[in-house]
Image (tube, rainbow, N blue to C red):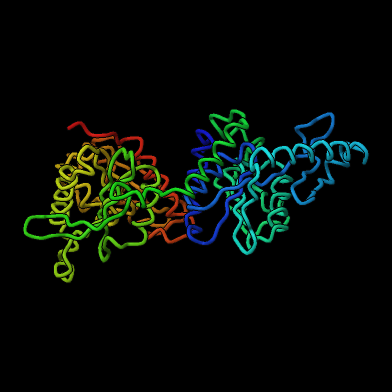
Amino acid sequence: MPFADRVEAGRRLGARLAELRGRDVVVLGLPRGGVPVAAEVAEALDAPLDVCLVRKLGVPYQPELAMGAIGEDGVRVLNADVLRGTGVREDELARVEERERRVLAERAERYRGERPSVPLAGRTAVIVDDGVATGSTARVACRVARARGAARIVLAVPVAPRDLAHRLGGDADDVVCLETPWDFAAVGQFYDDFAQTGEAEVTACLRRARRRRTSPGPEAAGPAGAEREVTVPAGAVRLGGNLAVPEGATGVVAFAHGSGSSRHSPRNRQVAEGLRRAGLGILLFDLLTDAEAQDRDNVFDIPLLAGRLLAATHWLRAEPATSGLAVGYFGASTGAAAALWAAAEGQPAAVVSRGGRPDLAGPRLPEVTAPTLLIVGGADPLVLDLNRDAQTRLRCENRLETVPGATHLFEEPGTLERVTELARDWFTDHMAPAHV
């Protein structure tokens, strides 16, 4: 799957690395192309951003071919195969290294000025580039981080050859890569926009990251960005919820949880966090009161649950913080059936179903007009069949996405991150501010 540009690649990579948030992480971008990617990762992890200064040692008569790489603190890695194959002499290697060391020193002054590098001792260093080709630069970056005392090193890139781990030779403790295509030839072939990153863009990314770390973020800015407790009226009952609306939100997504769950569902909260970081508001609320939830019949009363979601929709359209925003539905399991049932009447901008039971909304499926994305685990055959059948009854724009290896609860590593990516892209593509 190609990336639109480095920013999109960074956002997807940040979502994949969400489990590192709050774990004393420092994100290190490799200048220049890796820094815009790293900036998005640092924002997703709420972590400081720094550069890891590394320079490729290009073959004198073929500079794009790396015979090795150097980094700060005197670190150097050589590619013996390239050196043998090209016949580069020691004196030629020395001249290239001397020139690149001067560039390293100049860039350290340009990017950091008088500021020291971000301390790594005892912390997790997440090293980010826009991709890996030979692996020489990545290996040097890992060794630089190790020399500076990092306790754990994670190399994170959007795309690389399938033998990436072998190329790193154990210099990274963990490797995270979104795409490892069989037809890998060069990093740039997997980007729609792979324009060269300028020095000004690198310094701007670092400046924004410093401002983010030293000034109040959305959560500190007040109700517009913070997650707050709310009460959603639904006829004679009042339902507890949590609402967060980031500044400049383009829409708000109401979550309908599945049977046996609540607004505190860790899976829905993980997806909600990914949507919030993409600029979408989120409403997590209980579809049933505590007393109602004790009766299992209520859990499968799809018209009742759909009515509660419609009540939440009316409330969102009247609530000052969300009144001008398009509303979307994200439903899981039986909550997906409620979302589809409600969509026939509530006219949401978009619907996403995760491991849903659309068969339980059968009579209303042909009436749904909102663009609908059905996400099912590839290892959840019964639900996959139910979704395939439901798709034939939908008359709206729709798509069925299977997540390979995922079972019904998407508990396998990386599967819920993929759900988050799919939902984020579907909502951002189909939601725009409502006209009121």
Give above or below for 431 relative to 148.
above
The residue that appears at 13% across and 60% down in the rendered structure is 238
Number of marks drawn: 0
Residue 42 screen position, x and y as percent: 52, 48
| Near-viewer residue (45 or 226) | 226
Q: Write the residue at 66% across / 35% down.
A: 186
Q: Is residue 87 visible?
A: no
In the image, residue 264 lies at what x, y percent? 30, 63
Q: Quadrant of residue 106?
A: top right
Please identify the quadrant where the C terminus is shown: top left
Residue at left offset 38%, top offset 52%: 273
Q: Give the quadrant of residue 428.
A: top left
Query: Where residue 370 appears, x then y in whole percent?
Result: 24, 38
Q: Nearer the viewer, residue 170 or 380?
A: 170
- Residue lying farthest to the front in this orientation: 114
- Measured as percent of width and height from the top left, residue 409 is found at 37, 60
Q: Nearer the viewer, residue 226 or 97?
A: 226
Residue 167 horizontal side relative to residue 159, left or right: right
Check the image and report above or below for 188 versus 165: above
